[in-house]
Amino acid sequence: MKAVVLTWDKYMPFADHTIQTYEKLWRNNYFTYRVPYNDNYPQSIKKKYGDKIEFIKTESPIKATVLTLLQDLDDNEWIYWCMDDRYLARIRDREAQEIYNLVKTIEDPQICSFLVIATKPYFHTDKFLKKDSKLLTNSGLVLYETVFSNGRVMKSAWRPQFVRVKVIRRMFESFPDYNFKAAEMNDFPKEKLEGEKFYVPEKNLVIVGESTHRGELTENCASSFKKMGLEIPANFTVTKKYMLQGYLPYKVAGLEFTLPVKMQKFITSVNRWYWRQK
């Protein structure tokens, strides 16, 4: 399966980092990472990942980049959609793999997306879920169809997910033709077609970190670069912003448990202090 990683030349270190987090934390994934480049072919990254990665030369505008990445793919083909600004911090890899296995068996063309991240306030109340429309993986993981007050709006465009090519292609084809900035895409309309079904797991499966904030490297991403043995890009300053999405319980000796909020904050503070010293 193609994992389409949206990036550009200046942010190639972040694409490398994102891919490395998936390879380290989701070891049994079946992805071939499809990554765009504009001018300089990333030979060192190609050498690092070999057949697990394919680089596609594209123009630099975001719309042209995505449409070029998808141009040889069938509308109904499934891809894994992941941007360089959402790297993997933790994952329930067995359950995520079960969603992959389920996706490979789906025949209904109206089923178009399976998220792997489910965060509050969305996807945790009946207001946003169709409890009478659900799917099950082999181990019994429940996936509910999502619903919003405006049923034609896509609320999860930038979250990591399994999605049909037609959804991403249609979204970018609808975007304006001028060379817009990435932040502007948040305000562009993103529509589902009538009858299309998008699903989310009953329990969250991943924690993802944001790589940058307003052009600066987040502190959590800088810490992750160090953990992964990567050099922090010299042309980025590090902000004190610490931006993680999603929550997973801790696990010791096969037992899962949830820490009190104050204890969680204390552990995060210690972790941040430790990686600042590195």
Image (cartoon, helix red, strand yellow):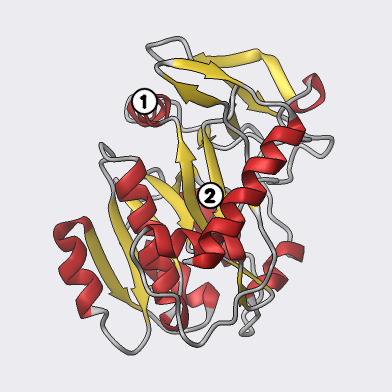
Which one is closest to the eye, mark 1 or mark 2?
1
Q: Is residue 75 above or below residue 91?
A: below
At which x and y percent is residue 2? 31, 51
The residue that label 2 is drawn on is 167
The picture quadrant where one finds residue 102 is top left
**161 lies left or right of 182:** left
Q: Residue 197 carries which label?
A: none
At which x and y percent is residue 268? 64, 46
Q: Is mark 1 on a helix, strand or loop?
A: helix
Query: Residue at point 65% right, 80% down?
Result: 180
Which amino acid type is shown beneath numbered disc 1? Answer: Arg
Query: Residue at point 45% right, 36% down?
Result: 91
The residue that label 1 is drawn on is 94
Q: Could you tell me if residue 85 is visible in this image?
A: no
At which x and y percent is residue 69? 38, 66
Query: Residue at point 63% right, 39% down?
Result: 246
**16 lies left or right of 84:** left
Q: How crowded is mark 2: few (under 14 residues within 10 Å), some or many (20 or more)?
A: many
* Cα–Cα span, label 1 and label 2: 26 Å
